[in-house]
Amino acid sequence: MLEVSEQTQPNQPAQPQVQTEPKKGISWKKIIITVVVVIVVSGVISGLIWYFGCYQTESTPASSVKVSTPSSSQATPSAQKNETADWETYAADDGVSFKYPSSWTLNKVSRPPGKTTKDYVSITSPKGFLLQFVTGISGLGGGGVAMIWVVNTYLM
Amino acid sequence: MAPTEDLLGKCATEFGGLVVVQQINELFTTYTNNIDMSSLKDSRKESTTAGGTEAVKVTGVYDMAEDSYGLNGSEVIDYYINQDGKVLMIEYLRKPSWPDESDTFELIISTFKFLD
């Protein structure tokens, strides 16, 4: 029993020694590998965060541009209001009103009685663009396209 | 249709363009459903609003077989506005040689309204 125990005793300490040395080696490797992996992964993650952060930062104006498109369309009426703020306003007797550039010239023309048309106004731009407000024309028939011929003929 | 004094002797080609506002004694729905756009190329018809009321906008370029009035190539923008069930037409006409005032025209349309 003693011999056996003596034989087993030297073997028993040897086993822990053999087991502890590899354990220490493997754990350091694991630690080193883990640290390296953590550094690499954190580096990659940081890079990705930086990249996408920059991308998002750069895309923010682009997205704001896209967002500003509807807002610009919303701003368009206000821009139009600003643009037409100093325009002249014409209000017709029959309940129609519109604004026109103040640089344009408005002429009120009285029509002789008995004609198919009533009085009308013409608004001419400095470039010679003419706006006519003709009321009381009815029964001329045809499409709206044909109507211009009447006025155009008149201008000739 | 006598011309005014300032227009006397002038030809339409002297003008930069033409906008006509005119009431048409036709029912709005019937009229706008039967607008003849055969004389226009690149024509487009769309529902819109003007003066806070429903309207139909027709755009295109004149392209007629018989161009008696020399309008071929002219840009046209028509607004047909529902005025108490009848038609109020506002038309923009620009010959190719005339300056483009369509932006101003659209601004004028944006300020258009019916008075109470």
Image: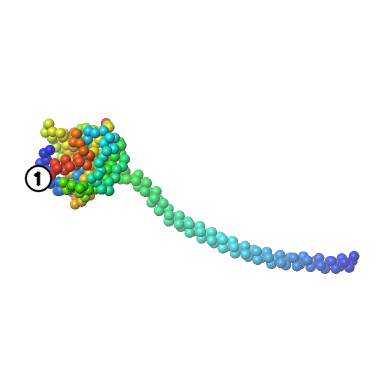
Residue type indicated by callout 1: Gly
Farthest residue to the right: give it: A1
Residue B35 higher or lower than A14, as above or below: above
Q: Secondary structure at mark 1?
A: loop
Residue B113 percent across, percent down from the top left: 27, 36
Q: How is the image coloured?
A: rainbow
Q: Quadrant of the C terminus of chain B?
A: top left
Q: Chain of mark 1?
A: B
- The answer to whether any part of residue A6 appears in the image is yes
Marker count (numbered): 1
**In the figure, is residue A99 to the left or right of A26?**
left
At 39% from the left edge and 50% from the top edge, which residue is drawn?
Answer: A66
Residue at image point 24% right, 33% down: B26
The residue under the point 12% across, 44% down is A156
Q: Residues within 10 Å of mark 1 (few under 14, many from 20)?
A: few
Q: Which residue is mark 1?
A: B9
Q: Nearer the viewer, residue B77 or B14?
A: B77
Q: Quadrant of residue A101?
A: top left
Q: Nearer the viewer, residue A45 or B35?
A: B35
Name the quadrant containing residue B30: top left
Taking B46 as reference, is A64 above or below it? below
Quadrant of the snapshot with the N terminus of chain B: top left
Residue B17's x, y, as percent?
19, 46
Q: Is residue B101 visible?
A: no
Q: Residue at x 23, y 38 (%)?
A: B89
Occupied quadrant, residue B76: top left
- State the image coordinates of residue B108 (x, y, percent, origin top left): 25, 42
